[in-house]
Amino acid sequence: MADELYIGLMSGTSLDGIDAVLVRFENEQASVIQSICSPLPQDLIDEIKSLVNPAKNELNRLMTLDIQLAKAFSEVVKQLIDKAKINKENITAIGSHGQTIRHLPTASFPTTLQSADPNTIAEETGITTIADFRRRDMAAGGQGAPLVPAFHEKLFRDTEKNRVILNLGGIANITILPADKNINTTGFDTGPANTLINHWIKQQQNKNFDQDGQWAASGEINQDFLKELLSDDYFKLTPPKSTGTEYFNAEWLTNKLSQFPFLSAEDVQASLTAFTATTVSDAIKIYATETEEVIICGGGVHNHYLLQLLKNELPGIEINSSAHYDLDPDYIEATAFAWLAKQTMEHKAGNLPGVTGAKRSVILGGVYFS
Ligand SMILES: Nc1ncnc2c1ncn2[C@@H]1O[C@H](COP(=O)(O)OP(=O)(O)OP(=O)(O)O)[C@@H](O)[C@H]1O
Ligand SMILES: [Mg+2]
């Protein structure tokens, strides 16, 4: 088949920005030909944070936010197209993840909500837009998350090496890729990656993230506090499982901290970073015992302290950034949504039942034609 262009749009739970990638698919290969990360306007960040938990007049506010986000996403698409100097007629479709407002896979009526109205994106950009990827998997009995493992499988599955792909976003998720092709790919959310780390430095120093993990590295891990963090029931659940910032949030942390008022702020930061490293490495030790290589993507790969802790926890396992394979770790997730859009346009499934727990593989998302 001739080559095709798709755009992937992603804004994750860290709220660090809207990632947009222009991807060329040719002979089963995906190459990113242009990418941008554009910050979300502060008023939208505040509104998203407020709506993640039950809030006053939330329906009207969400409906407004849905359109505001779609306009912001459309603007980023226009910037991407300008930067790439291509004609939009050549782009088959946009895969837009949207902004997760709530993810409730264990509610009596499981559901999830990703906001950024695709009608508006299709209308503003003039490009066919695919969105709402997660709910079809949920309708088929799945967690609706994580969805990137199918793309990780395509990029990284190797018949020689047992690999784990680790995405360190707001939440951390792993994709387990056995070398034995008779064994299905599995994966799940291991718990928080950056969300609590970001929250704590914001509250203490008004910074958005802990640059290279420097602040955490200046503190000491408090083992009792770490043990308390690890005692949460989420870590006792067996996969498939997924989680979000409506659970691991400021309130959760405040609650855990209440028994440790004597800890210095930097010791809390060191312990929160160790919490991410331990929950990830425990998940690998329990569910991916044969792992030979861990390939990391997502913004957390830039946190040197976190990476050092992970290496300490996983001796004998090769640990690489996806950059080692010429794949920019900051754009793999957005690229995955470009690929998921392509799957949908070709009437192919996008979920992996072994990961989400769905009864079957299904074609994901709704299509909003240009
Ligand atoms: N240089 C750095 N040092 C430390 N942490 C960093 C650095 N650069 C990025 N990060 C962390 O990575 C986060 C952004 O990662 P990413 O974009 O993968 O997460 P996300 O948008 O929440 O995605 P997801 O949907 O996977 O949760 C930032 O909020 C920050 O915590
Ligand atoms: Mg992000």
Image (cartoon, rainbow, N blue to C red):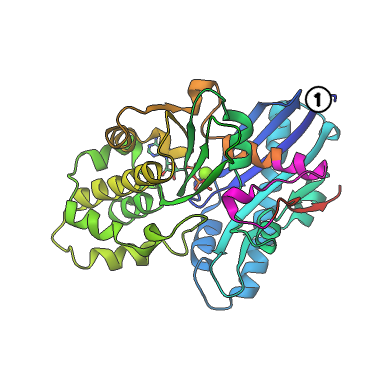
Q: Residue at x 62, y 59 (%)?
A: 142
For the record, the magenta segment spans 340-359
Q: Residue 290 lies in magenta, yes or no? A: no
Residue 96 in the image: x percent, y percent? 69, 48
Q: Is 11 on the left or on the right of 162, as rendered? A: right
Count of all numbered marks drawn on residues in the image: 1
Q: Is residue 339 above or below residue 138?
A: above
**Label 1: few (<14), some (14–19) or many (≥20) C-alpha neighbours in 10 Å:** few
Residue 64 in the image: x percent, y percent? 66, 66
Q: Quadrant of ligand 1?
A: top left
Q: Quick one: SS at disc 1?
A: loop
Q: Amino acid at mark 1?
A: Asp
Residue of label 1: 3
Q: Is residue 231 above or below residue 60?
A: above
Which residue is outermost to the front? 182
Q: Is 147 on the left or on the right of 175, as rendered? A: right
Q: Residue at x 34, y 34 (%)?
A: 307
* Residue 291 in view in this figure: yes
Closest to the observer, 368 or 345: 345
